[in-house]
Image: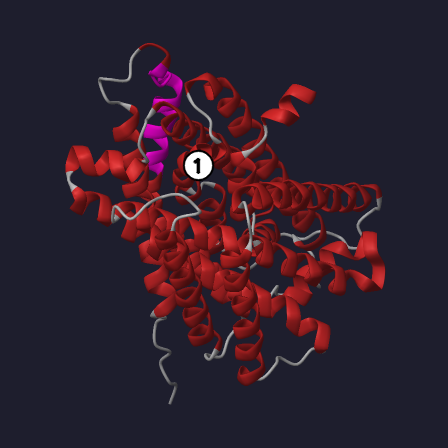
Amino acid sequence: MKRILQAIGPAIIVAAVVLGPGSILTSSKVGASLGLLGLPVVLGATVLMIAMVALSARLGAVYQNSPCDELASRLGRPVSVAIGLTLFTLVAFFQSSNNIALIGGVEPMFGDAPLPLVARTLVLLIVNGLVISSLYLLKNLYRSVEGLMKLLIGMMTLAFLFNFVVIFISPPDFERVVPEASPDLFALLGMIGTTFSVGGAFYQAYLVKEKGWGIGQVRQGLIDSIVSMTVLGLITSMILVTSWRVFYGNPNAAALASVGDVARQLEPLFGASAKLIFCTGILAGALSSFLVNALIGGTVMSDSLGKGAKLDDKWPLHLTTAALLVGMGVAIASLAREGSTVHLITIAQACTVLGIPALAAALIYLGTRAELTGPRKVPRWIITLAVIGFLVSCGLACLTANKVYEKLNPPAVKEVG
């Protein structure tokens, strides 16, 4: 056990940034609308995520240069820039959901009425300003982030585990009925996008290099990937099953249109303070993934341009700041529109699926080069699962594009008479 805990490192950062507030909310919606049918999806997404993270970790350990530099030397700088721009765009979408979730965590603490747009904007300006300041002021950024992510993942695991156990000890206070409403497949796509996050997996290669791992730590990287992604899958499953127990088939279930509605999950454990504690968790999840998520986009974009890939380089910090500002701008524009913040988060999370195929293809390409022989060769099972993940991501991209179009362009209602 001690050896396993010591092996946990870079991948726990990926797990923490993937398991953000959007993942919590979409998993809750899937449990409420689809019930236990969502569990096999979580399992499949977790297995594919393990393979992608393990592949990326191995590439970071066996290649001398960073992934985008390797792509540029083989396929040309334009291909590298395309990969960097794709991931930067995905990060901006994901970052916007972190901003929206931050507001969703703050508002219920001040009553049931939503805050005015001016107050929402002010909150986002203050938080993003503090995060940007810490980005430039923190020393040994990687070590600080890794330690914080281990702590937060541990806290989240214990909180949801306790809640999970208490809910199943207590008998349900309603008679379950078959839901009449159609299942929320869009939330299911969002949950897959947050669990099987190839964008997060792609960044694992950079984290491995920050950690200083080489060919001698390949096995350690595999253990790190398996343990960290399994924890991610278990937490997602606990959230989903908890939501199923409380909401699925409940004739009086809430519509889950706000963080306060989802907070009812925690009532068996925390009683009347459920909303406050759940909203605090949403805030913690949003803030913990704020910096790391933006670092993914900023670092890979900088690397794709040939401007450096280390956290102590200037260009990754500047482009990380740009990712933070873009995400905040998209969030403010989204919040200016009327509607549920959970709905906005779901759209942002599902949109992250659209760029996955290109990132998955890049990892598979680097993992199948002829010069990777002997101990540098990627095991066949990892490549096989990665190819399956690529095919799944292509299908998800098509489904997501269609669902996003339907959400943004609802059919017109014909007037009667």
Q: Residue at x 45, y 40 (%)?
A: 196
Q: Where does the N terminus fall, quadrant-wise? A: top right
Q: Residue at x 61, y 65 (%)?
A: 255
Q: Where does the C terminus fall, quadrant-wise? A: bottom left
Which residue appears farthest toward the top when viewing the image? 374
Depth check: give the residue in front, 49 or 151. Answer: 151
Estimate the x, y position of residue 101 in percent, counting from the top left. Answer: 56, 64
Magenta segment main secondary structure = helix
Depth check: give the residue in front, 317 or 110. Answer: 317
390 in the magenta segment:
yes
Per the rendered image, the range of residues in magenta is 376-392
Left or right of 239? Residue 409 is: left
Q: Is residue 251 above or below residue 2?
A: below
Q: Is residue 47 above or below residue 260?
A: above
Label total for image: 1
Q: Residue at x 17, y 44 (%)?
A: 77
Q: Residue at x 73, y 60 (%)?
A: 264
Secondary element under disc 1, as helix, strand or loop, is helix
Depth check: give the residue in front, 62 or 4. Answer: 62
Q: Is residue 52 above or below residue 258?
A: above
**The residue under label 1 is which amino acid type?**
Gln
Which residue in the structure is indicated by mark 1?
A: 204
247 in the magenta segment:
no
Residue 182 seen in the current view: no
Residue 122 seen in the current view: yes
Which residue appears farthest toward the bottom when viewing the image? 417
